[in-house]
Image: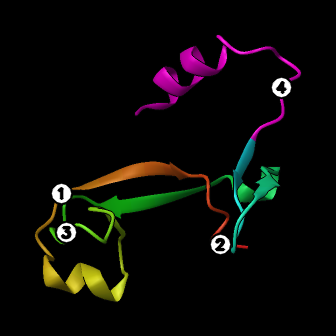
Amino acid sequence: MTVTELMATLAKFPANARVVIPGYEGGYDDLTVEDIVSGRLALNVHTEWYYGPHVRVGDYHHAKRPDAPEEDAVLLSGEER
């Protein structure tokens, strides 16, 4: 999904609808400005079903496929806090 696609999707919801992300052990947390960070991803590094396919550039998992194509991304997890 691109930022343009996300904006178009969000435009379909009421402007005052709460935006949340899954909580650590369950439930939901409010999405905050601090939860939205930019990063660079190495694409399609993982093939195992239990991992997401992409990793942050420089992550030790990236060494599994250092030739992976890279792309700028918006991360909604707040990892960088």
Label 3 to label 1: alpha-carbon separation: 9 Å
Q: Residues within 10 Å of mark 2 (few under 14, many from 20)?
A: few
Residue that badge 2 annotates: 80
Label 4 to label 3: alpha-carbon separation: 35 Å
Q: Which residues make up the magenta segment?
A: 1-19
Residue 11 colored magenta? Answer: yes
Give the secondary structure at mark 3.
loop
Position of the N terminus, as image quadrant, is top left
- Identify the residue shown where x is 30% and y is 71%: 50
Label 1 to label 2: alpha-carbon separation: 22 Å
* Proximity of marks 1 and 4: CB atoms separated by less than 8 Å: no
Which of the labelled discs sits on residue 69, or is there none?
1
Q: How crowded is mark 4: few (under 14 residues within 10 Å), some or many (20 or more)?
A: few
Which of the labelled discs sits on residue 45, or is there none?
3
- Identify the residue shown where x is 64% and y is 21%: 10
Please tell me whether mark 1 or mark 4 is closer to you in this view: 4
Residue 3: x and y, percent? Answer: 51, 30
- Identify the residue shown where x is 71% and y is 15%: 13
The furthest residue to the front: 26
Residue 53 colored magenta? Answer: no
Residue that badge 4 annotates: 17
Earlier-in-chain disc, 1 versus 2: 1
Badge 2 amino acid = Glu
